[in-house]
Image (cartoon, helix red, strand yellow):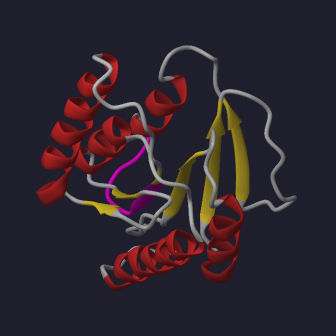
């Protein structure tokens, strides 16, 4: 018997502003969610939502996620280097603002991130990202829903 890979959502949960939305979408589709953080975090009591607490080592949550994802998984992260690792592994990666990271876009996105990091380090740029907005939340919901629908159409199970 050939068993289908099931869709799973991996959440880089530290400072993720859309966890409640992820839980709602996952419940609607019956998709497993891994909430990965380096500290205890409250999650809904649901067998399809699993809390994963990693060490507080540098990039421990990123490493845990990147080592497990493959085609058929969705990763929610604002961390561009993690998104790059996940896309290279074949997973779909989405930012909390709804931006889908793809093979075509991740190189430029990573280069821009590194340039901005260098400019911030040099004191050239002092501001951070714009505040999270209701439009971002809506864009995220659409992007996550679309990613799951595409994976289902591609033959992945829920």
Residue 5 falls left or right of residue 42 = left
112 to 10, vertically: above or below: above
- Left-right relation of 148 to 43: left
Q: Nearer the viewer, residue 83 or 111?
A: 111
Q: Give the percent coordinates (x, y) of residue 136.
A: 51, 69
Q: Nearer the viewer, residue 2 or 153?
A: 153
**Is the residue 7 above or below the residue 50 in the image?**
below
Image point 53% across, 51% down: which residue? Answer: 10
Image quarter in which the N terminus is found? bottom left
Q: Is residue 157 above or below residue 77?
A: below
Residue 70 within the magenta-colored segment of the rendering: yes
Question: Which residues lie in the magenta part?
Answer: 68-75
Who's the residue at 74% across and 28% down the image? 39
Query: Where residue 32 sits in the image (x, y, percent)?
Result: 62, 62
Dominant SS type (magenta): loop
> Which residue is at the front of the view, 53 or 20?
20
**Nearer the observer, 1 or 110:** 110
Residue 42 percent across, percent down from the top left: 84, 46
x and y percent of residue 111 in the render? Answer: 16, 38
Determine the image quadrant of residue 48.
bottom right
The residue located at (57%, 67%) in the rendering is: 133
Q: Does residue 8 appear to the left or right of 16 in the view shown?
A: left
Residue located at (47% from left, 53% from top): 130
Which image quarter: residue 114?
A: top left
How many numbered marks are there? 0
Residue furthest to the right: 45
Magenta stretch encompasses residue 45: no
Q: Is residue 98 left or right of residue 46?
A: left
Locate the C terminus by quadrant: bottom right
């Amino acid at each position: 018997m050939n068993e289908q890979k099931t869709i799973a959502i991996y959440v880089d949960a530290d400072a993720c502003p859309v966890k409640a939305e992820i839980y709602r979408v996952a419940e609607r589709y019956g998709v497993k969610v891994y909430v990965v953080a380096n500290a205890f975090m409250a999650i809904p009591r649901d067998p399809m939502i699993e809390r994963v607490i990693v060490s507080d080592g540098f990039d421990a949550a990123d490493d845990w996620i990147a080592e497990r994802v493959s085609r058929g998984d969705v990763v929610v992260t604002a961390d561009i280097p993690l998104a790059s690792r996940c896309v290279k592994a074949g997973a779909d990666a989405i930012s909390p603002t709804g931006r889908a990271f793809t093979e075509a876009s991740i190189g430029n996105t990573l280069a821009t991130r590194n340039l901005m990091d260098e400019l911030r380090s040099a004191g050239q740029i002092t501001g951070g990202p714009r505040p999270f907005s209701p439009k971002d939340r809506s864009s995220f919901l659409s992007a996550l829903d679309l990613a799951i629908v595409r994976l289902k159409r591609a033959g992945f199970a829920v």
